[in-house]
Amino acid sequence: MFIYNVTTHVEPNIESRWLEWMNEEHIPQMIQTGKFKKAIIFKVITENDSGGVSYATQYHCSDRTAFERYQKEDADRLKKHALDKFGERILSFRTELEQIIVL
């Protein structure tokens, strides 16, 4: 399994709006691309308050090829939509994870 992880730092005054948007718009759009099987959002727990809260969203796909198709066909459009809606009030970084062991 291949996981596309997007960690996003969200300003406190838009946190509930951002979560609603993720649940009602963005994640459904990601799943509708046909490249991802499911998505899970985790709240990042930290003792360091940096003026906001962070969330890690994991998009699960069957293999790297599906992810590469997402990068070519859908990524720019969906990233732009997030930036147009929230601008600099969110800051995201992306990592790619390959599942190695399941116990």
Image (cartoon, rainbow, N blue to C red):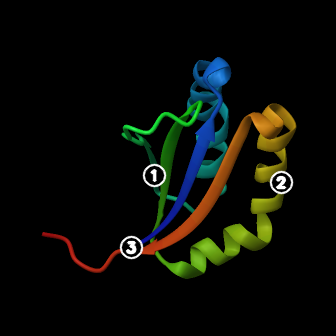
Residue visible at 42% across and 42% down in the picture: 44
Distance Cα–Cα, label 2 vs label 3 = 24 Å
Do the residues bearing badges 2 and 3 touch, measured as CB atoms within 8 Å? no
Q: Residue 80: x and y, percent?
A: 84, 49
Residue visible at 44% across and 39% down in the picture: 48
Q: Residue 30: x and y, percent?
A: 63, 50
Find numbered disc 2 in the image and state the secondary structure of the residue it sits on. helix
Q: 76 or 16: nearer the eye?
A: 16
> Label 2 belongs to which residue?
77
> Label 3 belongs to which residue?
1
Q: 12 or 37: nearer the eye?
A: 12
Q: Quadrant of the N terminus?
A: bottom left
Q: Residue 74: x and y, percent?
A: 76, 61
Decide if residue 96 is on the left or right side of residue 13. Answer: left
Res 38 label:
1
Distance Cα–Cα, label 3 vs label 1 = 12 Å
- 12 in relation to 68, above or below: above
Q: Residues within 10 Å of mark 1 (few under 14, many from 20)?
A: some
Q: Residue 86: x and y, percent?
A: 78, 33
Find numbered disc 3 in the image and state the secondary structure of the residue it sits on. loop
Identity of the amino acid at label 2?
Arg
Name the image quarter holding residue 67: bottom right
